[in-house]
Image (cartoon, rainbow, N blue to C red):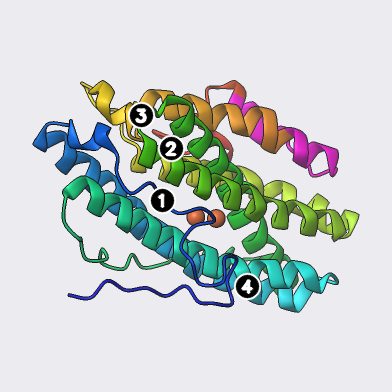
Amino acid sequence: MMARVEHTREGRWGGRLTQKPLPERDETIEALAPELRTKLAGIWLSRAAMERRVADSFGVVAQALARRSPDKALVRLAERAVDDEYRHAELSRVVASRFAGRPLPSPALLALVVPEHRGASPELRDTLHVVGQCVLNETTATAFLETCLAHATGGLARHALRELLSDEVDHGRVGWAYLATTSADTRRQLGRWLLPMAYLNLRLWQEESPVAPEHHPALSAHGAPPGEVIHAALVDALETLIVPGLRALEVPVGPLERWIAAGAFTDRPPAELVD
Ligand SMILES: [Fe+2]
Ligand SMILES: [Fe+2]
């Protein structure tokens, strides 16, 4: 089966997969036990599937920004982000293949469920789609990748994580920059939507990095630190990046702060969501 390669020459690196070529050899991979190589191949391949789904999500974001953003440069950045996410999917597949020791086919497509945000006006819904993907999900992705990088020692993993991280930082900025152009009224209206969005976003990330009873240090070395380490970093990003950023833009963050203060639990919906 042919690997699907959907990024284009119009993208960030003129059709190349990465800014700098990936290391051709990584002896630390060759030294791994076969079962660890298989496990890491699976982890990186599941990341490829998620990156590919984010490409679809950025298609929604680019359309929303084309309708609402006075700044056309932001629309172009969102369009480029679609291409970036295709590259991320392919990069993750290539890394997975290096762990597997053979070319792996692209994983099955994950269906994107676009949040309905029922009850929001079309204008507000567009803003919610930008905030959900860029401000929440990409800022969370940045914290995730920073944590993976901080624990990684393997040459290939570190290279791939750095490439992914620099793009995700950019994708988060698209959302923050757009939010700063919205009216004070729109930003006030965002308040009541934030807690359910942040709760669902964190729950999804935690599901994708489950806490395992045992964690082999080699997984951390190659880009997959323990679930509990990742979870703590994601909650920290909510508390120290996302909430202060929203507060600075005068978005009401009270319910979000109360949920974080209660431990940012994801095993049950926050009480404020249960009518
Ligand atoms: Fe990505
Ligand atoms: Fe991204």
- Marks 1 and 4 close (CB-CB < 8 Å): no
Residue picked out by circle 3: 227
Amino acid type at mark 4: Glu
Considering the numbered disc 4 on the image, is that residue within a helix, a strand or a loop?
helix
The boundaries of the magenta stretch are 244-260
Q: Earlier in the sequence, mark 2 or mark 4?
A: 4
Residue 149 is a magenta residue = no
Q: Earlier in the sequence, mark 2 or mark 1?
A: 1
Q: Residue 120, position in %: x, y? A: 68, 65
Residue picked out by circle 2: 158
Q: Is residue 89 above or below residue 226?
A: below
State the residue in front, 164 or 177: 164
| Marks 3/2: CA–CA distance | 18 Å
Q: Residue at x 71, y 51 (%)?
A: 173
Mark 1 or 4, which is nearer the eye? 1
Q: Residue at x 51, y 42 (%)?
A: 162
Residue 250 is a magenta residue = yes
Residue 57 is left or right of residue 204, and the answer is right
Image quarter for residue 209?
Answer: top left
Considering the numbered disc 3 on the image, is that residue within a helix, a strand or a loop?
helix
- Marks 4 and 3 close (CB-CB < 8 Å): no
Q: In which quadrant will I find the C terminus?
A: top right
Q: Earlier in the sequence, mark 3 or mark 2?
A: 2
Residue picked out by circle 4: 79
